[in-house]
Amino acid sequence: MNVHKLFRVFSVNLTTYYSIGTFLLTLIVFEASFGGGGRLIDIGWFSPRMYLFLCGISYFLYGYAKFKIKPRYEFLMMIMSFTGLTALSLLVAIGNEIPLHAIVSDLKPMAYFFSLLFFTVAIRDINQIKLVIKLIKAAALLLSILFLLIIVVWKTDFVSTEQVVAWFNPQHDPQREFIFRGDTTFFFKAVVCVGTGVFFSMNEKNNFVRLSYMTIFLLTIASTMTRGLWLSVFIVLAGYSYFNITNKIYAVLSALALIILGVLGVIIISNILPSAHDSNAIRIHDLSMFLSLFDLKGVLLGKGFGADVLGRSQIEITYVNILYKQGLLGIFFWLTPLCYICMQARKLNECNLALAMPFILSVMMVYLVSLTNPFLTNPVGMTIVLIAMVVINLLININNGLQPKVELELYTDENKLSHI
């Protein structure tokens, strides 16, 4: 069966195509937000996230082949740059005789960047933006409620520590979704979605609902004792307060208060968490050893995918991993989405900027927390970065009158969001 016959068999009109895209968008965004590292449901080498990823790419290819739907130029350039950088890193890895399984292990999560192609065609108007916001908040709220319920049941002795560990990670495998911090608490990889939930709850119109959401999300982050995420959230909130409060005295006081809360939280968690001192020592040791041992000859392209970083497949400092494996070219590339978002956000009007702000703040948080945890180069953090780029680009089109009038009216008349 040739390609033309295949298209006739699976032929759909544009309306149906877009409906399928909305359905896929719902599955992909919720799974990426709720699913953490992608192994919440372990069905073998191919996880549900991989199947959804392939569905998303297939959806884009079908739209391109049949309806000539193309990504915007800047996104196409990013995809081409990512492809070129990936090819270079593969060649360097092959030249350094790195085992294939190690190369694939590094490449699999990074390949999720190609999902940008899907998001560019699936997020096409205000309705999809609103859907994404609802999905992220729903995933964050569900994660928080489930986690807090488990903690309450555990700490009130309805179940023992041994039972909880047996349910979630009996082998203490660091590749699983749940990682226990002794018998104090546990960390789940989707907790970064709870961090984004803080920012997506900021535009709730009802003050009680907004404060309730934020309290639940912050309590969840604190209970996981994830210091890097806690501090990153408060630093971003401090920056937002400083730049959005008109009275500069209040702006400075608000920002300082938020930073103090963030630092106090880190201090309290460090005193409670038995492994905090060891974790700090490992990060400091890793950074100092890396700086002293890094080969300047590989500074441009790095050592390639799969290269051991200080005897391990990767360390927790994302940017050190990137520099070691993909060199300065890798650092420049992975900073490109952040630069793009910051520059494009300046083009938004006040109303659309309010809608985009949770995405912008979430991206800032992902980049900050990646100083201590490998989120940026994994789907769990990459998803929000990719979606944010598409959303901001779409809102700029709305600014410029490139979206259908009915969609623009739907937003400005019924869904106008204001700053906190």
Image: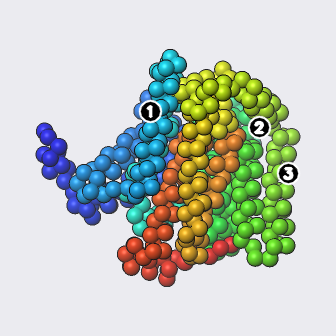
Quadrant of the rendering where the N terminus is positioned: top left
Lateral position of residue 383 relative to residue 230, left or right: left
At x 83% / y 33%, what residue is drawn?
277
* Amino acid identity at mark 3: Leu
| Marks 1 and 2, how far apart at CA | 44 Å
Q: Residues within 10 Å of mark 1 (few under 14, many from 20)?
A: few
The residue singled out by tag 2 in the image is 184
Locate residue 124, reporting x and y percent.
40, 64
Mark with earlier residue (1, 2): 1
396 on left or right of 253: left
Residue wearing tag 1: 87
Kind of residue at disc 1: Ala
Q: Tell us which disc is closer to us: 3 or 1.
A: 1
Disc marking residue 403 = none
Q: Is residue 418 visible?
A: yes
Taking the image as shown, residue 56 lies to the left or right of residue 164, namely left
Q: Which residue, as the protein is rendered here, is positioned at the far bottom? A: 413
